[in-house]
Amino acid sequence: MKLNIGCGGNRLRGYVNIDSNPGLRPDRIMQAYDLDFKSGSVEEITANHLIEHLGFFKTKYFLSECFRVLKTGGILKIETPRIEKTFKIFLKAKNARVREKALGWVYGAETDGMGHKYCFPVELMEKLTAEAGFKILKKEFYNYESSRPACRFVLRKPKHSRLANLQAEFRKELLKRKIPCFTDEQVSSEQEKIIEKVMCAIKEGV
């Protein structure tokens, strides 16, 4: 089984197309950070220009959920704006049109649900994906449009990932109990510190 998460209007053949907006008529309606699939049941996941709409803390849960549902050796493909180069384009732009286009790539559209909540520099993506347990197979850089650079990460769920699997199952249990507080950044930050302490304690015990 393959998943296309945050499909929007880009439905892919051979994939289960998932979105939280029922108006887009996806195959399955669900939140990207709380997947209704069994652990280890998915071969591949694609998420094109999704995480910038989720925000920082929801993206951590999204990565965890992807890790949980993927089979060992499964692949996760993520595309997101290449924010570092976008800033450079903005600063070097010779006219307002280019600057405006770059700003739109940072903040997203004003249409409901299309605004960007967070930007993910390459070094942050490397950190977050590693924390979730993934191995980076490939990083690619391309232009989504003129003045709108993007990056693509191809990630793999490795063998011998017991601790990362435990972390993913732990986060899933928190979701089931409706414990994560995504509406309050301070609470989310404190919850992440607790998760980190729990995982450190588990690591020391294995």
Image (cartoon, helix red, strand yellow):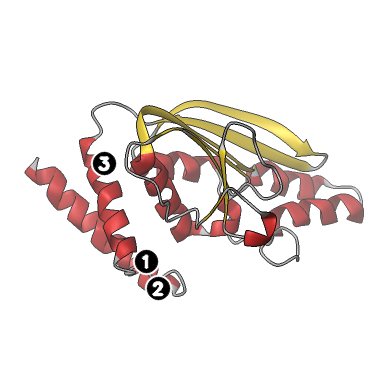
Q: Tell whether 57 sits left or right of 47.
A: left
In the rendered image, the vertical position of residue 106 relative to residue 185, given as above or below: above
The numbered mark at residue 186 is 2
Q: Tell whether 63 sits left or right of 204.
A: right
For label 1, the residue is 189
Q: Tell whether 48 sits left or right of 64.
A: right
Query: Would residue 151 be seen by someone viewing this image from the given angle?
Result: yes
In the displayed orientation, state which residue is furthest to the left: 205
Cβ atoms at labels 3 and 2 below 8 Å apart: no
Cβ atoms at labels 2 and 1 below 8 Å apart: yes
Q: Secondary structure at mark 1?
A: helix
How far across and how far down the image is residue 118, in percent? 57, 58
What is the three-letter code of the residue carrying label 2? Gln
For label 3, the residue is 165
Q: Residue at x 50, y 58 (%)?
A: 31
Dot 2 crowding, Cα within 10 Å, few <14, some 14–19, many 20+ = few
What is the three-letter code of the residue carrying label 1? Ser
Q: Residue at x 69, y 41 (%)?
A: 85
What is the three-letter code of the residue carrying label 3? Asn
